[in-house]
Amino acid sequence: MLRTVFARPSLLRTQRPTINPTFWSRLLHIETLTTPNDNALKYLSKDGELLQPRGSKSIVIKNTDKTLIDHSKLAESLFVQCPGVETIMIGDDFLTVNKDSLVHWNQITPTVIEILTAHLNSGEDVVSKEFQGAQELKDGGYNINVPKFNYTEDEEEISELIDELIDTRIRPAIMEDGGDIDYRGWDPKTGTVYLKLQGACTSCSSSEVTLKYGIESMLKHYVDEVNEVIQIIDPEQEIALKEFDKLEKKLSSKEASA
């Protein structure tokens, strides 16, 4: 992780003994950016401090991921001090926060900025060294429903091409909106590409449009072997979508009978 003079208290004490460290940490600039999802905001570090090495895969932690939270002081602080925060996504120079729709951003944003500034000022890693192992536990983390495919040499090349296209052509644009995308595999038998949308994209109403008319169209254009793109969703997301669909049908039937 990159560190600046702001993240090294010993230098502050030596060179600027009269400055209050709390005040000094506020010189770091955190920009708050809206996303296509009303319940997600992107908090961007503007002074060059990084949460992770540049280009790293984003880390997603939910407020129910007790196993993962135990390995991230940043996540723990956000979930404890910001009631209503449901999910955080940690990028390289930004943090995306997804909240409960009943909670107003004014109740969350000041504390998020304070916690994020303190973390950047500390120079600590966003997760412990044991995080990866915790993420792979059966009942902890977010790598769920991951398809497994055994590729021939030619199929491996196609899969690598898909991964490269996503990483270089698609991922940067999605990260601009506070989201991220994780390539989970390509099925040679059906031509199906499996992806996981993260961050602001998770519950965004336009995510299906992005998936089908943006990502799918591009991949099919460059890779003849791609037939469709499917988004992998978490079990609780699947339940929520089914319940929402039931509610929509119920409301529609009431309007029809009125």
Image: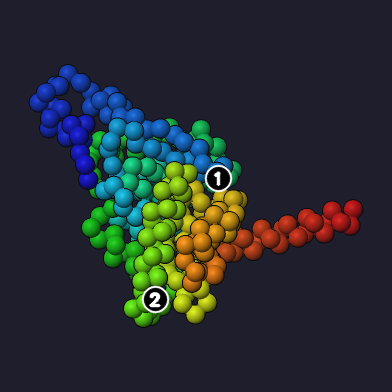
Q: Position of residue 93 (x, y in %)?
A: 33, 42
Q: Say above or below: 159 vs 37.
A: below
**Is residue 244 depicted above or below 30 in this figure?**
below
Identify the residue shown where x is 48% and y is 57%.
197
- Label disc, if present, on residue 37 of the rendered structure: 1
**Left or right: 94, with 245 as reference point:** left
Q: Which of marks 1 and 2 is nearer the N terminus?
A: 1
Quadrant in which residue 15 is drawn: top left
Binning the other alpha carbons within 10 Å of mark 2 as few (below 14), some (14 to 19) or many (20 upward) gives some
* Numbered disc in front, either 1 or 2: 2
Q: Distance between the residues labelled 1 and 2?
A: 36 Å
- Asked if one can make out residue 113 in the rendered structure from this viewpoint, the answer is yes
Residue 60 lies left or right of residue 39; in this view the side is left
Q: Mark 1: which secondary structure? A: loop
Residue type highlighted by circle 2: Glu
Identify the residue at horizontal 34%, vertical 36% (top origin).
Answer: 45
Q: Residue furthest right?
A: 258
Up-down: is 217 above or below 37?
below
| Foreground pick, 198 / 258 | 198
Residue 38 image-quadrant placement: top right
> Could you tell me residue 229's position as x and y percent?
53, 65
Label 2 residue SS:
helix
Measuring 20% from the left and 21% from the top, which residue is drawn there? 19
Local packing at callout 1 (Cα closer than 10 Å; few below 14, some 14-19, many 20+) is: many
- Which image quarter holds the N terminus? top left
> Where does residue 249 sit, x and y in percent of width and height?
76, 60
Q: Is residue 63 at least partly visible in the picture?
A: no
What amino acid is labelled 1 in the image? Answer: Asn
Q: Where is mark 2, residue-wise?
A: 155
- In the rendered image, residue 72, in percent from the top left (x then y), is placed at 31, 52
> Toward which corner of the image does residue 254 lie, by quadrant?
bottom right
At x 30%, y 44%, the residue is 51
